[in-house]
Amino acid sequence: MIRQIPERLEQARFPLEGAGVSRQLTLAFILLSSCSPAAPAAEAEIHQREALPPQRPALNASRTTAIVIAAERVAPAVVSVSVIRRQQQVTRSPFDFFFVPRRYDRLVEGFGSGFIISEDGIIITNQHVTEGAEQIVVTTRDGVDYTATLLGEDPLTDIAVLQVVASGLPVAPIGTSSDLMIGEWVIAFGNPYAYLLGNTEPTVTAGVVSATGRNLLPSRNQSGVYVGMIQTDAAINPGNSGGPLTNALGEVVGVNTSIFSNTGESVGIGFAIPVERAIRVAAELGEHGSVRRAWLGLSVASSEDLREWKQLGGIQITDVAPGGPAHEGGLRNGDILLMAGGKPQRTFLDWEAAKLDIGVGDSLEVTFMRGNSRRRAVIRVRDLPTATAERVSILQDIQLISLTPAVRQERRAETERGALVLQIGERTSQATGLRVGDIIVGVNRRIVTDAEDALEAIRAASGRSRTPVRIYFERSRQVVYTDFYISR
């Protein structure tokens, strides 16, 4: 994934003046001509060099650095991932209207990288590599192609898990990112620009750990949450997404994911997902096909209050769900969150990082201020209320749940009552104008208080075939409406 930055980065240029070039060329000519057999002195020098073979093993040994050993250890487990996905296109040229529909689908090819974590063909890559894929092919280092099955993908963490039918595959050693030191060597593996480089041998680039715990501000239309990231200046280019980032021991410490760039190429600011998060998510995806999200039952100040932590010393708690985990742990609205899981809480992104790296059933220790009193609490993590709520089906493929106080806190809704759209089919969404996350608050002139109420209101409205149904709903904290017909 490439993130654009506003200001153009100037590339360093080293101009070669005419005289300098001629001096370099002259020197090159002298070095080459010294190897000519026409000069006896040169022959003597060559024989003298050939008489000293013991220096060569020492020289070769000095070339075998830790990075070379790490590359030999990890490269066999690095794979290329090629996908075919269907994208909807919109006609732009006036001539297109005569030959193609206004909206049409086109098959496009995408590329990424991945690494093998088990001998029976389990592979980790990025979710933005596999998103919308109709066909996935994995190519190993030795050029063998495998048709891959998508075991699961998680847009929030940008992790996907693939499986190929094989055995005895090389496995990438898994390390830890928790003890990474700023400035230590790291190595990025991947297949930039896919097959344009001519073969399937993974590209190896080296750099250092520039920073840890980096939180990236969300960009437009971004589904993933990129927090607690590893920053490196090892070159990461298009096609590297999903490849491993390793330490100098050849142990995977992260998953290459994104870069900051205004050109689409590496400018030395790359980011990787910590390997602990990737392995945990991969295990859940492999076992359940989805990830159980942690619910702590509290909300904190949003991005509009990023600078207030300097005055507050932390982030303000803006909402605590009654009876939720945070409420039972003793936290209340207005408390200032200072620490969570041993890490300082300065912005809402720090809180997102704390939530992203815990699972259902875990405990999170927090430190907070209430007035002038510094306190501690332990929050017991539960499933999201939307994951355990009873569902009501309407219009065949719309799933609704009632907007309880817990669900309201989870979704940060303004309205206090209504029915949340939890699932909806693509065609029904296009026909009705509703989306996942909308909160139905009214049908025609009837107020909707919960999911059952919405079901009854829709049933009553569906008896009027010539009259459109008007649904009022909350989206992005604004109440709007949509009209549509229900065919009997």
Image (tube, rainbow, N blue to C red):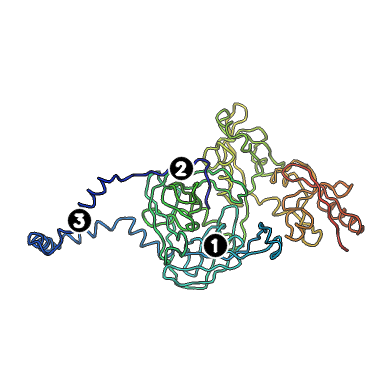
Quarter-wise, where is residue 44 in the image? bottom left
Which residue type does callout 1 highlight?
A: Gly
Crowd tier of the residue under label 3, counting other residues whose Cα lies within 10 Å: few below 14, some 14–19, many 20 or above: few
Residue 117 position, x and y percent, is 48, 63
Q: CA distance from mark 2 to mark 3?
A: 37 Å
Q: Which residue is mark 1?
A: 110
Which residue type does callout 3 highlight?
A: Phe
Residue 99 position, x and y percent, is 69, 65
Residue at (79% x, 59% y) in the render = 393
- Number of marks present in the image shown: 3
Residue 301 position, x and y percent, is 63, 36
Residue at (47% x, 68% y) in the render = 139
Crowd tier of the residue under label 2, counting other residues whose Cα lies within 10 Å: few below 14, some 14–19, many 20 or above: few
Residue 102 position, x and y percent, is 71, 60
Q: Mark 1: which secondary structure?
A: strand
Name the mark nearer the viewer: 1 or 3: 3
Residue 29: mark in rendering? 3
Residue 9: mark in rendering? 2
Quarter-wise, where is residue 371 in the image? top right
Quarter-wise, where is residue 168 in the image? bottom left
